[in-house]
Amino acid sequence: MDHWSESEGKRVHDPIFQPRISQNCRQPVEEFCRERSKGAAVTRFERCTWVPGPIIVGAGPSGLAVAACLKEKGVDSLILERSNCIASLWQLKTYDRLSLHLPRQFCELPLMPFPADYPIYPSKEKFVAYLEKYAARFGICPSYNHAVVCAEYDEKLLLWRVRSQLTGKMEEEVEYISRWLVVATGENAEVVQPEIDGLKEFKGTVVHTSAYKTGRAFAGKRVLVVGCGNSGMEVCLDLCDHNAQPHIVVRDTVHILPREMLGQSTFGLSMWLLKWFPVHVVDRILLLVARTMLGDTARLGLKRPTVGPLELKSLSGKTPVLDVGTFAKIRSGDIKVYPGIKKISGRQVEFLDTRSEDFDAIVLATGYKSNVPFWLKDRELFSDKDGLPRKAFPNGWKGERGLYSVGLTRRGLMGTSVDARRIAHDIEQQLSAEGKL
């Protein structure tokens, strides 16, 4: 007899699990929670809830995709979302001009394509509208303002216990218990704040890109953008469009590729070439075309890594910059490039090449990180170092004892779709084998 069958047998005779399932597929088990919380010094549970289906943490595109794939197979789920909306990163923490960097066909969620009248690169407003229609189509209703503070596997119950804190109610916590736990909090859950000598004492404005909306507020000002990924490059372009004077810090090497090559998207061309050639050959083709179109980027302070863009993405997760016009501004001198920062004094920034300049504002385009290690009490599927699955794609979607991961593959929305389908299929197979679907 497997451990789950044994657990099911025990619960048949356990009065805690006897109440009938409510309409929203969850049952209160307050008596169980009161027993479990005896002796707790700080935490008090206002409610404890049994969830027959999977618990999904995060209502971004990844969480929605899993819920939709499960719903299609007749399996309900509970989504816990710390914010007050779906796709909170897209709705609350992105700049106004943002659009998808890849063509829409590579960013579709499972079971529902983008509308045919959408542009090739949908704006963030159109992408959010697509997600809202997606949630409505599959009847997905997340539990908002539920910040998960702890999730751990109970060896006695053979179930996952997930504790969430209601936003704005610091003392009120709710505990959910379920057989399955799906981590869908994404690679961009928390901002990364760089450690720069003197940054905290900078006399001007300091803002992370998660709070940057438009360059309108920086018109006529000297702005230093720290970080040269897609966000940093696009923020510089936005600042130029609003008559600011942007400067960008390029501390590491970076691959810049035109967003389109040979009449089609660079990403689409890459996917097609990979059907016929190995990665290192495709990288050589991309770099050859990029050099023909952009010239030698190293002359402008943008040195390329020794590893090709696709191989680097596979090894480290570092995404190449898909240029949407920023490089032309760098070449014309409208955007100045600087190396790493040595220190900051007042409004003056001293760079590693000994140059010093005064700035009115600093925009930190230093990215995000996973927050999984802060709340998930499991170290088998996820790494403590970066909060991502230990196994590389496509093998990082499933852990032990009903634990799953989606959207943390470093493969974007395409990887999310693959993970979501696999998770739903795996849970469906378990339920079918037990005659419970």
Image: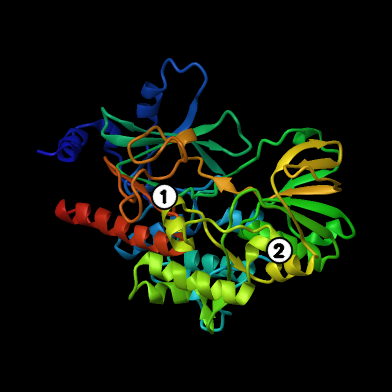
Q: Is residue 174 visible?
A: no
- Could you tell me which residue is drawn at 73 percent across and 33 percent down? 197
Residue type at the position of mark 2: Asp
Task: Name the mark on residue 78.
Answer: 1
Q: Nearer the viewer, residue 302 or 274?
A: 302
Camera-side mark, 2 or 1: 2
**Amino acid type assigned to the residue bearing label 1 in the image:** Leu
Q: Callout 1: 10 Å neighbours few (<14), some, many (20+)?
A: many
Of 310 and 396, nearer the camera is 310
Quadrant housing the N terminus? top left
In this rendering, would 335 be left or right of 258?
A: right
Image x and y of residue 366, in percent: 64, 47
Left or right: where does residue 79 sit relative to residue 207? Answer: left
Image position of 205 (left or right of 145): right
**Residue at screen point 42% across, 56% down:** 314
* SS assignment at label 2: loop
Label tally = 2
Question: Is residue 20 shown to the viewer in this render?
Answer: yes
Secondary structure under the numbered disc 1 in the rendered image:
strand
Q: Quadrant of the C terminus?
A: bottom left
The mark found on residue 96 in the picture is: 2
Please state which of residues 34 and 253 is positioned toward the viewer in this rendering: 253
Q: Is residue 43 above or below residue 381?
A: above
The quarter of the displayed image where residue 130 is located:
bottom right
Residue 301 lies, in percent from the top left, at: 68, 57
Q: Earlier in the sequence, mark 2 or mark 1?
A: 1
Q: Residue at x 85, y 43 (%)?
A: 204
Residue 89 in the image: state x and y as whole percent. Answer: 59, 54
Binning the other alpha carbons within 10 Å of mark 2 as few (below 14), some (14 to 19) or many (20 upward) gives some
